[in-house]
Amino acid sequence: MGPGDLITVKTKDKEYTGRLMPNEETDSLIIKLDSGYNIGIDKKNIVESKIHETLNEPKKGTKLKIKKDPKKPNITILHTGGTIASKVDYQTGGVIATFEPEDLIEKFPELHDIANINSQLVSNKMSEDMMFADYKNMIEAIKKCHDKSDGIIIGHGTDTLGYSAAALSFALEGLGIPILLVGSQRSSDRGSSDAAINLINAAYFIAKSDFSGVAVCMHSSMNDTSCAILPGCKTRKMHTSRRDAFKAVNDTPIALVDYKAKKIEFQKEHTKKSKSKLNILPEFEEKVGLIKSYPNMNPEQFLFFKGYKGLVIEGTGLGHTLVGKEDEYVKAIKQLIDSGTIVTMTSQCIFGRVHPKVYTNIRKYSNIGVLYSEDMIPETAYIKLSWLLGNYPKEKAKELYAQNLRGEISERLGTDFLD
Amino acid sequence: MGPGDLITVKTKDKEYTGRLMPNEETDSLIIKLDSGYNIGIDKKNIVESKIHETLNEPKKGTKLKIKKDPKKPNITILHTGGTIASKVDYQTGGVIATFEPEDLIEKFPELHDIANINSQLVSNKMSEDMMFADYKNMIEAIKKCHDKSDGIIIGHGTDTLGYSAAALSFALEGLGIPILLVGSQRSSDRGSSDAAINLINAAYFIAKSDFSGVAVCMHSSMNDTSCAILPGCKTRKMHTSRRDAFKAVNDTPIALVDYKAKKIEFQKEHTKKSKSKLNILPEFEEKVGLIKSYPNMNPEQFLFFKGYKGLVIEGTGLGHTLVGKEDEYVKAIKQLIDSGTIVTMTSQCIFGRVHPKVYTNIRKYSNIGVLYSEDMIPETAYIKLSWLLGNYPKEKAKELYAQNLRGEISERLGTDFLD
């Protein structure tokens, strides 16, 4: 049997059916299951195997000829990589992008009913490997298609989709159209993929609502029904594999969309489409770090960031990190601040708000100038600080860090930090 | 007005009543609100203020004389610090522990109805500052009171309570009695404190159930009704301030307890009390680190841990970190592994399971020897690796890391990583 063959193998107590993947290891098989995931099986555990079908690449059909309909909105789909709108190349085991508009519409014909679709390949990277340079490429691509698009969909790997959503939210000031980041947790050439529903719901939401701004469109539950439109600066991947992994944190979804039921339900106020002037602030400062606080950590870990312009601490509880017997952690952080680093505090609790005044230890940090981040999630705080330091002088960056610029900080309602 | 005075101050649009706290800053007041939290008020915003009562420390009553009842179980309460069972000293602004058994019973008389209470002050530290040395002190104190106790309650600050619960779970092999870690999100000298309910429910659960093992006892909802008994290795503080901040992750609560309704409901199977021999493995290796992966991070951050015996990566998604244009991240991590560091992978999604085989980038890491951590949360993975390297030789530590020792890894059900 060779890569791409449809096979069934039996082990002592289980049976797996799927396409055989290329594999450098000789003592195991890798099978791509119908779920879209690979499973590795030790050859010595296989008791029986069968080939159902040898590799037969689907024939390229005659390309659809798509006419632009002037009554339909124009949606541009930018592809950056990841599981969505990609398929497995069974010869190499790699994932290849199929991103001509015709290919997309062939795959998801509903798109054609909703809008005139243009598409462009920006990059083809798994999102765990995204760098600030990739953010700049995305922003450049958005700039180019912005004026001729009623809305933009960005196909993106799910691992760092939340970070990218925050980056675009900050970089695109005064955005008057919707930009939706869409990923999928299962690869799109598989039956169980969430790619189609996420993509179609995103297109439908762009076409049929008056929303503008950067948001995420992903499954709202484990069922293949509606998608949630999630706020660009307050969304986090909260599960490694579930299709409804993306959740609004310290916030609610903006809307729920269900293309099949032709329903859009807004959950909160939103910014409307407008002809406002787009102001692009595309820089991200490279010398910014993020560090998680944990028991017994080495205070020298903070000093690694000496010479950095910014550092976000993912502290504990209401915004603590260690103090130490002789305040050695406070001293390390003070060294950073004295040498010019902006140091800010968030919480690894993820949910809730940090507070600079509650406890004596916290006051040790706020007194040396650590900035508290309200209810910003650590990932957004990191992106915001990098963006601020890329586009503004230091003092202005500090001032803006404390302000809510793109919905990243919720208003504090009285003593709501106690809820 | 002076520290401890009960005052009301009005600002333009709000009014605050509470005890005045000591404050080194001269341009602001800090008031401890009835909620237990402090609020800082800029003096220039105060339009009116009133003193209701000057400091009047409560008179020490005559100590209760408590007789030991042989029919009641014996519970030892060990205090390590934190908000629970502490009160504010209005002279210094510090938090002081009141931890004689008589004081506790005076404060929470229900405890006396449930059990014979012994108590001991182990330390008085806010938990964000906990070090491995503090774990050893806790373990030492447990060792001393173990044989004369039917159960132990550990009063602990909430910030790193989850980490400590994992540390005790691993260190106390073959534990035949219940040990419950209890914290509070509001200080216990305040009306809204959750200290009483958490403590009383913990005592009731120890007295009335057959559970043994290390677990956490905290509010199960925002109402002051039942508490959840949460698994020692799978519990995480998931909110900065809510009383029900503690949640079981990739697991369910062990039980719900409601002292008022006299109800204990187990949610899953549990280990029973027994006369099994307690085997204490109290060491934690100091040269172990935890690092969070994020876009654009510096590969040198990994090399900080050169010379370390272990490093846990809090990766993205199914267990990724960056690869880099020239595999520079993979090379940095390989350098660590080649120099003897055990490197393991967890996910910042928190919920779900990592998987070493799904994607090409992940296989780059599993191929150089990064160990995948199944559905262990990053905090437990860090504690487990430190503990393994403190008590076992390297190869044995690697072998045990992959095994479920104390409930820290859930069994994988078929392809449940896809759920």
Image: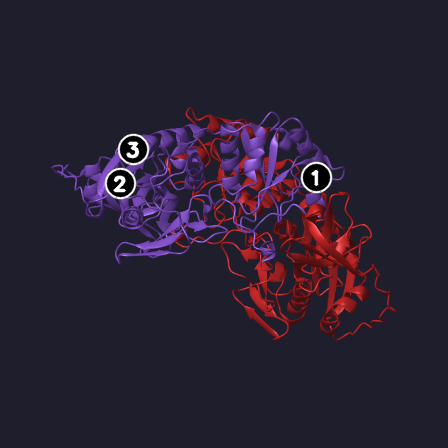
Chain colours: A purple, B red
Element assignment for label 2: strand
Tell me if I can see residue A344 in this picture.
Answer: yes
- Residue B183 visible within the image: no
Residue A70 in the image: x percent, y percent?
A: 18, 41
Per the image, the residue denoted by label 2 is A75
Q: Residues within 10 Å of mark 2 (few under 14, many from 20)?
A: many
Q: Label 3 belongs to which residue?
A: A145
Q: Which residue is identified by label 1?
A: A367
Q: Is residue B29 above or below residue B341?
A: below
Q: Are marks 2 and 3 on the same chain?
A: yes
Q: Residue at x 71, y 49 (%)?
A: B126
Could you tell me residue B8's position as x and y percent?
A: 73, 58
Q: Earlier in the sequence, mark 2 or mark 3?
A: 2
Q: CA distance from mark 1 to mark 3?
A: 47 Å
Q: Is residue B220 above or below residue A54?
A: below
Identify residue type, mark 2. Ile
Q: Are marks 1 and 3 on the same chain?
A: yes
Question: Which chain is home to disc 2?
Answer: A
Tell me residue B167's x, y (percent).
64, 49
